[in-house]
Amino acid sequence: MQKLARRAFLMGAGGAAGWAAASRFGARQPVLDGTQRLAPLAGSTHLDDASGLSATPVHKHLHLREDPGPALVKALRAELRSARADGRPFNIGAARHSMGGQAIPRDGVALTFDNGFVELDRAAGSYRVHAGARWSQVIAALDPQGFSPKVMQSNNDFGVAATYSVNAHGWPVPHGPMGSTVRSVQMVLPDGELVTCSRTQNSDLFNQAMGGYGLIGAITELEVDMLPNRRLVPQYTALPAETFATAFRDAIADPDVSMAYGRLNVGRATFFQEALLVTYRDSEDQDDLPAAAGSGWMAHVASRIYRAQLGREPMKRFRWWNETTLGPAIGGGAVTRNSLINEPVATLDDRTPERTDILHEYFIGFDRFPEFLAACREVIPASYQEFLNVTLRYVAQDDESLLSYATEPRIAAVMSFSQELTQRAEADMARMTRALIDRITALGGSYYLPYRPHARPEQLAAAYPRASEFSAAKRQLDPGLVLRNNLWDSYLRTL
């Protein structure tokens, strides 16, 4: 019988037992009577992102599908020239999975890239890719040739240049953010000049665009590192949360470990007291690797269990037992590297018009992790938010990006909340976010910028000490400020 993929248990699985439990103990929705709803704006004159809370008016929204090359450059130059002449902002997006309008130009020209061009160079160990290609398309191109992305985001429906532009990380170890695996990029600058940027050519622009949120140039293509695809075997270790950082650091230092992540128990009674460490090592059998696959029907079971946690502490306890006991027992078989990362974020879509999924992400040094746990225990349960999951990943030190969130090796805590689409919930989320940022930056950590714009400008400056340097470089390169988005308008322009 075919082994079940690890991603089937990423958010909880458990087969028939989980399905029965989720059916019996469905999500308990809070009563929204008397609250003021946040009604999403619709229509061709507005663009939104994954939050459903960032509807922004745009002048026009265009799709570009040209292959990387002269036709694409010509189209970009024409739109940039038109935007400059009209005094309108310009920005490019792909899937727009950010949550605060970071890829939306207010009253401006919004471009969406839609092209899956991928070209392998086996001898160089890299691939050339269209800026708008999704990671699912990269995997589809690399997998039959026996290769895998060196680092990508944890889901496959994001755009490649978008990943570079937010400098997202994944969970392969011991690597840094995705930008550390990019060899070069081509982009059209605000004045229309086409440039190639790398660590040896236009390196200042390369470092500014890495994690630069599309504010430096319009990227057309990238050359990115790839690795051989491998068959991997997982190992699951349950341990006290206080000892997780030490165990995680030891796992990352193990040269045989190529993938690793952690979990924390989110049930209120034992909040952040228990941890799970999952590591992957090469299987002895590397012959006849199967084609990349996702979790299939098990992902739908996982989604039911994940959603059934809403308002039900018994389901949170069930899910934790499932992840630490049942899941490893029946889903601990070998799986390929590409299958592990070949899962869309849409698998866990709540499909509930009254709620939205909101992500937070915080980065903390290994030595301060116990203090991070204490801060989260004091802030999160006291809020009125439904906390569903936290995944712990490793990020190596990043000294390249001006907007680096990992100025030392750090643990990344990716948090998932289910938020009511009401004004009260938005206000509660903003208060909790600001409190967490204050506590975590006081520990020398940072927070991630692609999410809801609840931080105060001074909090961004504290977490990103080179932000003012980035803003100055952007103004010098783009004095007309034609490349703009909500991140610039709300924060970076003030520095």
Image (cartoon, rainbow, N blue to C red):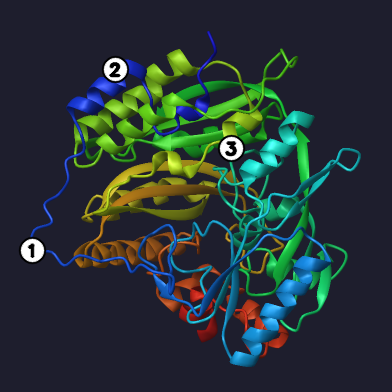
Disc 3 element: helix
Q: Is residue 495 visible?
A: no
* Residue 362 drawn at (x, y percent): 46, 55
Lower position in the chain sequence, tag 3 or tag 2: 2
Residue corresponding to mark 2: 17
Q: Does residue 144 appear left or right of residue 102 in this picture?
A: right
Badge 1 crowding class, 10 Å Cα cut-off, few under 14, some 14 to 19, many 20 or more, is: few
Badge 3 crowding class, 10 Å Cα cut-off, few under 14, some 14 to 19, many 20 or more, is: some
Amino acid tagged 2: Ala
**Which residue is painted at 79% across and 67% down in the image?**
71
In front here: 65 or 494?
65
Q: Which mark is residue 172?
A: none
Place residue 179 in its image quadrant: bottom right
Q: Which mark is residue 34?
A: 1
**Which residue is painted at 39% across and 59% down in the image?**
51
> How far is disc 1 from disc 3 in space, using C-alphas?
49 Å
Residue corresponding to mark 3: 249
Query: On screen, 279 above or below 113?
Result: above
Dot in front, 3 or 2: 2
Q: Does residue 131 appear left or right of residue 153 in this picture?
A: right
Amino acid tagged 1: Gly
In front here: 271 or 307?
307
* Residue 304 drawn at (x, y percent): 31, 32
Q: Does residue 61 appear left or right of residue 469 in this picture?
A: left
How many numbered marks are there?
Answer: 3
**Which residue is painted at 35% across and 65% down in the image?**
53
